[in-house]
Image (tube, coloured by chain):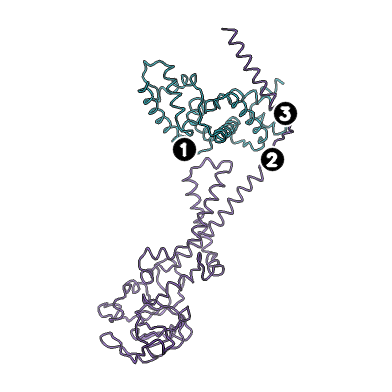
Chain colours: A purple, B cyan
Amino acid sequence: MENQINNKQINNETGEENLKSKILDLIERDKIKPTSKIYFAVKDKALWSLLLISMIFGSIACSVMIFSFTNSEFGFYDVTNDSFFDFILRVTPYLWVILFVVFGLIGYENFKHTSKGYRYSFGFIVIVGLVINIVLGVILHSFGVSKMIDHDYLPADSMFIRSSDALRRESWNQPDKGVLSGQVISYGSSTFVLKDFNGNLWTVSSVYIPDISLDLISTSSEVRIIGVKQDVYFPLASTTATSSGGIVSGAVSGASTTPYIGSIVACYILPWDTEEYVSGISKIKGYLVNVDEHERNISSERNNNCRAIKSYNIIRSMVELK
Amino acid sequence: MTDILNKTDEELSVLLMASDYSAMAVLIDRYQKPLSRYLRRIGVYKEEDIQDLLQDIFIKIYKNINSFNKDLSFSSWIYRISHNEAISFFRRNKVRPEGNMIEDGEEMLFKTEDESINLTEEVDQSLNAKILQQAISELDQKYRDVLVLRYFEDRDYENISDILQIPKGSVATLIHRAKSRLKEKMQKLWKIK
C-alpha cells in the first residue's frame, strides 16, 4: 500500500517535470517571446482614446438633443400637434438619440475592457457616463455648438434627420389645423397675402386682430398664424368684421380663378423668428403680438371664428405684450 | 538557484518581463499543482485536457507577462488567465463542466457548516460530499465559479472580482444566489437518495 502511494507520488512528480520541460522546450523551440510592453501600452491608449472619442460624440449628440428639445416650442405643442404624444414623436431627434445610444455602448464596452473597468457595475458606469455626457452636452450647447450643427450641418429635408428649423416649418404648415407660416407678400388694412414655405399663396384675414402691428405684418416679414381655414378667399382690403364675429366679404370662390391655394382667418399672428427659448414653456419675448386686450380678459367675447381654437388659453398665457 | 526559489511571484514577474527564463520554471513549479486542482474543480475532468490547458495557460502567461497589472496580485492574474482558458475550452468543445471533487466536497462541508449549506448532522460525510459534488456540477457555470473560488480556493471577494472580472458587489450577489441554489439542489438530491 505504501509502495503504491510512493509510486503515485513519483508518477505525479514525473508528470509535473514533464509538463515543465515540455513548456520550456516549446518556448525555446518556437522562440516564443513575451509580447512587448509597447503593444499593451498602445492597446490601452487605444481603448482610452476610443472611450474619449465616444464620450465627445456622445456629448455632441446630447447637446443637439438638448437644442432640439429646447427649440421644439413645447408651449405650442397643443397648437401644432394632436396630442403631447404626437408632439414627442415629432420632435424626438431619432438619429441623435440612436447616435447617443451607440456611442454610449461603444464607450461602455471600451471602459469595461480597460484594466480596471470590470470593477464597476453596469449601473454605476451608465449613470456616471450619462452624467458626464449630459454635463458636456450642456456645456457644448451653451457654447452654441449644437446650434451650429443644427443650423449649418443638418439637411433641411431628409428621411432620417432634419434641422429644428425644418421641423418647425413642417409643424407650422398645417392649414387644416389652422396653423400656417410663411412670408407676407402684400397687405391691406385687414387682409394680407402669405406665401407659405412650400411656395403656396394664401389670403389671410387679420380682421379679428385689431391694431395690427406694421412691424409684424410688412412685406417680406415672416410670420406664423394660428387661425381657422376658410372656404372663401379674401380680396385684399375688403374684409370687415361683423359684431357677431362672422365675416362679410366680397369673397371670390373657386380656386381655378385665383392664384391662392386657400384662405385663413387669423386669430393670432406671431413672428416666425422668436428669441430662443430658454425652456420649452418660456414666453415669446420682445414681440408685439396683437391680441385684443379686451378679448384676452373676457374669453366669452371671442369671435365665432376664433372661439374654437383650443389653445387660446395657452397662447394667451404665453404671449407677452410689449 | 535557491535565491530565485525564494522570490515572490511579483519579483518573478519582474524577472520574466526582463526575459529571465529561469523565472518561468519556478512559476511552473509553483502553480502547476494549484492550477490543475482549480481546473478540475471548475469542471475540466480529463487529465489530458488539464495537461493541455496547463500548457496553454503557462505559454499565455509567458507571452502576456508585460500586460500584468501590478495593481493585481500575480496569483489573481494567473487564475484569471486559467479561468478564461477553461471557459474557452468549454465553449470550444461544447462540453458541460463535470469535475471530481469528492475530497474537496468533504472539506467544503466543514467550511460551510456555519453558512447553512450542510445537511443533517447524522448523515455520513462522504454521502454528503457526493451530494454536494453532484449539486455543484448541476449549478450554472457562474455560480459554480464563485463557489469554487470562495470555498475551495479560499479567495476573498476582491480576489474573486479580479479573477472573474466582475464587480465586487456582483461577487457577493452571485455567492448569495449560488448558496441558495446549491442548498435547494442538495435538499432535492437528498430526498431522492
Tag 2 near tag 3, CB within 8 Å = no
What amino acid is at disc 1?
Ser
Say whether mark 1 and mark 3 are on the same chain: yes
Q: Name the residue under label 2.
A: A37
3D distance between C-alphas at marks 3 and 1: 38 Å
Q: Where's residue A81, x and y in %?
A: 38, 69
Which x, y percent locates residue B146? 48, 31
Name the residue nearer the viewer: A320 or B66.
B66
Give coordinates of residue A322: x percent, y percent: 39, 79
Helix or strand or loop: what does disc 1 sit on?
helix
The three-letter code of the residue at mark 3 reads: Tyr
Q: Are marks 2 and 1 in contact (CB under 8 Å)?
A: no
Q: Are marks 2 and 3 on the same chain?
A: no
Q: Mark number for residue B21?
A: 3
Circle 3 chain: B
Describe residue A313's horizontal placement relative to residue A14 as left or right. Answer: left
Is residue B159 depicted above or below A40 in this figure? above
B85 relative to A292 in the view: left or right? right
Q: Mark 1 points at which residue?
A: B170
Badge 1: how crowded within 10 Å, few (<14), some, or many (20+)? some
